[in-house]
Image (spheres, rainbow, N blue to C red):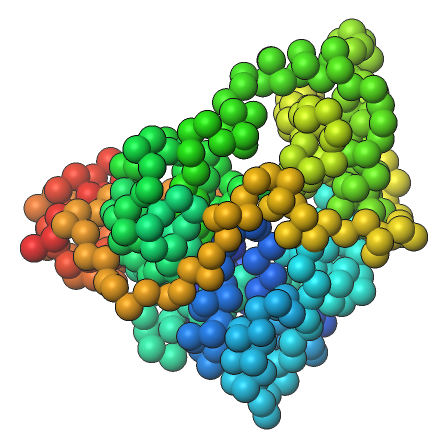
Amino acid sequence: MNISDTLRNAGLVGAGGAGFPTYVKTKAEIDYLIGNGAECEPLLHKDARLMEAEAPRVVRGMQLMAEATKAKNCVIGIKSKNQGAVDAIRAAAEGTNVTIHELQDYYPAGDEYELVHEIAKRLIPPKGIPLDVGCVTNNVETFFNVARAVDDGVPVTHKWLTITGAVREPITAVVPIGTTFRECIELAGGSTLDEFQMSLNGIMMGQWETDTEKRVTRTTGGIIVLPVDHHLMVRRSREPAKMHQIGKSACDQCTFCTELCPRYLLGYDVQPHKVMRSLEFTLAGEAMWNKWADLCCSCGLCTLYACPEDLYPKEACDRAKDDLREREDGWSGPMEVEAHPMKEYRKVPVKSLMKKLNLLKYEHHAPLTEKALEPDMVRIPLKMHIGAPAQPVVAVGDRVQCGQPIAETPADALGVTIHASIDGVVSAVNGEIEIHRS
C-alpha cells in the first residue's frame, strides 16, 4: 500500500485546526516541506510538549512525507523560546535532511502564509495555497501521526491538547477522540471557577463554548478555561449587529488596524479600516469597501490588539467576506505581492498581546501528563475534516476495538476513515457514533 492510501485509511488530517486530509499532500512534488511548530496562539503548548516527548517520530514523519513529495528542503519552524523542543528536534534530526528554523515569539507566526515567507522566502499568491509556490506545510502533530501510521500501523484515535487557563493543574494531555471537555478539565484538576467559558483551539482564532459536554475531535488543540466576566468573554458575547453599530458610530479611521495587519504587512491588499467604512455607507457602496476584506485571514489582531477604541474590524471583515461569498464575487485585485518595508518592525510579541488581553496570569508551562483519560463513553463525529462526511460501517450493538474503522469516506470523495477511540459497544449511529466502554 502506498503512503497516500495508508494515511487516508489511518484517518490523518491536519492536526493544527483546519482538518485537511493529509494524504492529498503526499501527491505533490515540492521544493519545501515545512513543519509548523510555531504554536503562536497564546497559552497553548501542546506542540512544544509533543516535540519534546516525541521528536524522533516527528522527524521520521517528516522524512516519510519528504520522500513521497520529493521535497528538496525539510524545515521545522519552532520558536526559540521553546528551547526544549528545539534541542529535542535538533538531536533527533542529526544525520538527516531535516533542519530547524528558529522563530521569534510573535503572533501569528504559525499562519501558513507567514511561515512560508519566513522559511522559504516565498509569497503565496492572493487566495492561493502553499503548493502554488512549491511548498507544503503540516503541523508537527501531523508528522507524528504519519510516522505512527506508516511505521506502526496505528490510526488516529487520540488527540494531543493543552488544558489550561483557570484550572488547578494546567497540563498537556493525550485523550481519546470523542471525550467530553468536562472530562478533560477534570483531568486538569477541575476549574478554579464556579462559572466559566472555554476557548477552543486558541484565544485569537478559536471558538468559544459553554457546553462542557461537547467533544474533542481530530482538530481540537486546546481547551482554555476563563471567567465568564473576562474582558474577552464580554466582548465576544455582543451580537454582530451591535458590534457593527458600535463601529459605525465610533470608528475614526485611524488606520492602526491596517498598519498592524499581518497580511497587509506581507503585501496583501487587506485594509480593515476601509472595510469599517462599509458600516457607514448604503448598500450601494458596500461592495466597493468589502473588497478590502477578501484576503483577511481572521487572525483577530485588528480587533483584539490594534484598535485603540476596542472596535470590531475583524468582525466587519468577516461580514464583508460573507457578503462577497453570497455574491460569488472572487478576488479581482492585484496578484503581485511584495512585503511591506516595515513588516519586520511591526510584529506583535505574544507577551504584549497577552498583556493587552489580561492573560498573563494564565500562562503556564502545561507539562505533558502521565495520567490517562479513560472515558466510559465517547461520541465521534462523522465530519471532522474538510471534505465529505464519512459513512458508518458499524451498527448499534456492534462490539468494536480501539483503532477499528467505524466510518469510511467514499473512494471518490475527499475525506478519511474514522476509527473507534476506545474498546466498547456501539450504542448510537447518526451524525456521530456513540461507543460505550465494555
Residue 188 rendering spot, x and y as whole percentages: 31, 53
Residue 336, x across and y down, in percent: 89, 48
Specify the farthest residue to the bottom: 95
Q: 137 or 388, which is in the foreground? A: 137
Residue at the top extreme, as displayed: 282
- In the rendered image, residue 170, in percent from the top left (x then y), is placed at 38, 55
Asked if residue 313 can be seen in this view, the reply is: yes
Q: Assign the N terminus to one quadrant of the image.
A: bottom left
Q: Nearer the viewer, residue 195 or 291?
A: 195
Residue 284 vs 219, above or below: the answer is above
Residue at 68 percent of width and 14 percent of height: 246
Q: Residue placed farthest to the right in the image?
A: 341
Residue 136 spot, x, y in % from top left: 64, 63
Q: Quadrant of the C terminus?
A: bottom left
For residue 308, which quarter of the picture?
top right
Quadrant of residue 434 in the image? Answer: top left
Residue at 51%, 66% (x, y): give it. Answer: 48
Front residue (pair 344, 426): 344
Residue 121 vertical placement versus 436 (above, below): below
Q: How many marks?
A: 0
Q: Is residue 287 visible?
A: no
Residue 321 against residue 265 in the figure, above or below: above
Q: What residue do we see at 73% from left, 25% from top?
A: 309
User: Image point 35% across, 47% down: which residue?
Assistant: 167
